[in-house]
Amino acid sequence: MTRLADLHIHTFYSDGTSSPQEVVLAAHEAGLHCIAITDHDTIDGFSPTMEAAQKYHLEVIAGVELSTEMNGKDVHILGYLFDCQNKQLGKFLESNQGDRVERMGRMIEKLKELGIKNIELEEVCARARSKSVGRPHLARLLVEKGLVKDIREAFDKYLAEGSPAYVTNFKQTPFDAVSLIKDAGGVAVLAHPMFTQIDEIIPRLVKGGLGGLEVYYPNCSDAAIQFYEGIAKKHHLVMTGGSDAHGKAKKHTYIGRMKIPYELVEKMKEAVGGKQA
């Protein structure tokens, strides 16, 4: 029987809607052997997921999705199998969480300039179970207040990149994140490169320590997957993949929507010296 993994899952500790217990149950029902919790700029969901997974003998590996910025564009770097106690990692996460709150305040100010004056920073932050507040929290509040019909409209009308209330505010670059994950003993992976579209800097990221590409991603064409398989092979990068599940926050994907063979997890472990978590 082929063992399968999903290495891109979010919980309600960042912008997902599922608890660690719900994530584990969904992974079990999807027939997964291994998952990674990759919450945005926080690892608070890792330990409770590990605890919940014991019941099903489900492997959970350390993961995170770090927010960075380059040329005014969001770039996400996934980290796996790092030391969760690494002090520099902790400082990076704390800095990014502060950036998230500041960014949220600026987006709310932009909404007020657009005539939406009944949303305050405190009520958006109250919807996050960690300090990793993000646009989905604001989008859900816009829906609750009847200002948009659904989350998609909230992004299309106000919050998506290029929309009138969008703000970039992360001080860290992808090169900073790659170096940090590598120094913390993990493997750094460029998240969903087919959407980030920064292929031109991949060689520079590789020189800086990039270890992998997220090649397998839901709702992508075979041509896109084959293209990034080729780039990964060219630069001797491990290939990863996952559903990017956010619970009810992203209805077009779900846990197990993208499954990868466990042998890719084994290759990632080999890249960091055989670590198990």
Image (cartoon, rainbow, N blue to C red):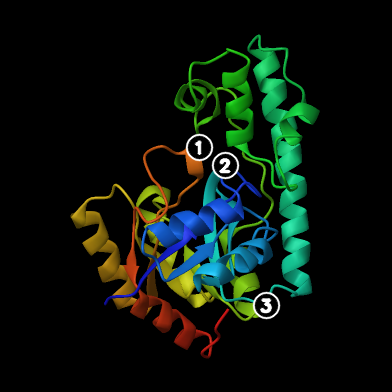
Q: Amino acid at mark 2?
A: Thr
Residue drawn at x 77%, y 56% as measured from the top left: 94
Q: CA distance from mark 2 to mark 3?
A: 26 Å
Disc 1: which residue:
249
Earlier along the polypeptide chain: callout 1 or callout 2?
A: 2
Looking at the rendering, which quadrant does residue 200 occupy?
A: bottom left
Label 2: few (<14), some (14–19) or many (≥20) C-alpha neighbours in 10 Å: many
Q: Is residue 237 left or right of residue 10?
A: left
Earlier along the polypeptide chain: callout 3 or callout 1?
A: 3
Q: CA distance from mark 3 to mark 1?
A: 29 Å
The percent coordinates of residue 276 (x first, y second) are 55, 83
Q: Are marks 1 and 2 in contact (CB under 8 Å)?
A: yes
The percent coordinates of residue 259 (x first, y second) are 33, 62
Earlier along the polypeptide chain: callout 2 or callout 3?
A: 2
The percent coordinates of residue 50 (x first, y second) are 61, 68
Disc 3: which residue:
83
Q: Amino acid at mark 3?
A: Asp
